[in-house]
Amino acid sequence: MSTEYVVRLAGPEHVDQLPDIEREAATRFGDSLPGSVLSHVTPLDSLTAAQQAGLLWVALGPAGAPVGFAVASICGRRAHLDELDVLPGHGRKGIGSALVEAVEDYALNSGCVEITLTTFRDVPWNAPFYARVGFEVIPEQELGAQLVRRLSDEAALGLERSRRVAMRKPLRRLTSAST
């Protein structure tokens, strides 16, 4: 990621700006998504709760304003990447990867054993991007109840289930070899 950008935990002053980032990031999908999905954003109360819990990260651009964000949730020893968005004008600069890394660092330090997410199977900046940063597709028969519920909730919003996939990234703390 360019040194012009900084990824950090979000402050309360960032929360109100994030739905606009989510909406603008969704415009990259064009007409391939139903309007109900394009108009749906993470509710402000959910973003505020995540910020207060230390589960919301922002990428700040050269002017110091948010240009991307990631929000996660924790369930037991699993972190789930609930949302990750970057403004299209700031794409392909390593911001998404840096946001994933921030979530991964938090998850590792919190004792999580993996990060999960749901995303589009066939969109280049979705499943293929996550595969490049270490995520793998979870076979349907291995989906737990929480991921099945998330995928069902997404289908209820109008997302075609056949285009969606759940992915996971096992987390391993690097250990130094003792001499």
Image (spheres, helix red, strand yellow):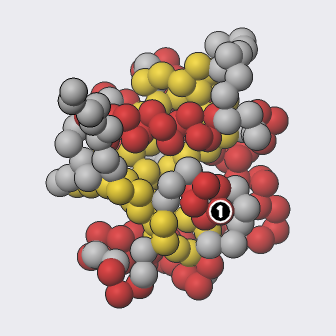
| Left or right position of 164 against 48 | right
Per the image, the residue denoted by label 1 is 128
Among the 4 quarters of the image, the one containing residue 36? bottom right
| Left or right position of 11 against 157 | left
Front one among 32 and 59: 59
Could you tell me residue 39's position as x and y percent?
65, 56
Among the 4 quarters of the image, the one containing residue 119? bottom right
- Of all residues, the one furthest to the front in this rendering is 179
Find numbered disc 1 in the image and state the secondary structure of the residue it sits on.
helix
Locate the N terminus and report the quarter of the image it occupies: top right
Task: Give me the residue at 39% from left, 45% from top.
Answer: 72
- Count of residue discs: 1
Task: Give me the residue at 71% from left, 66% from top.
Answer: 123
Task: Give me the residue at 41% from left, 84% from top.
Answer: 140
Mark 1: amino acid:
Pro
Q: Is residue 16 above or below residue 11?
A: below
Could you tell me residue 157's position as x and y percent?
54, 71
**Residue 47 in view in this figure:** no
Task: Give me the residue at 31% from left, 47% from top.
Answer: 172
| Left or right position of 3 against 55 | right
Locate the C terminus and report the quarter of the image it occupies: top left
**Residue 98 in view in this figure:** yes
Q: Is residue 55 above or below residue 25?
A: above
The residue carrying pointer 1 sits among few (fewer than 14), some (14 to 19) or many (20 or more) residues within 10 Å by Cα, namely: some
Among the 4 quarters of the image, the one containing residue 52? top left
Q: Is residue 70 above or below residue 163?
A: above
Front one among 86 and 139: 139
Could you tell me residue 65's position as x and y percent?
65, 18
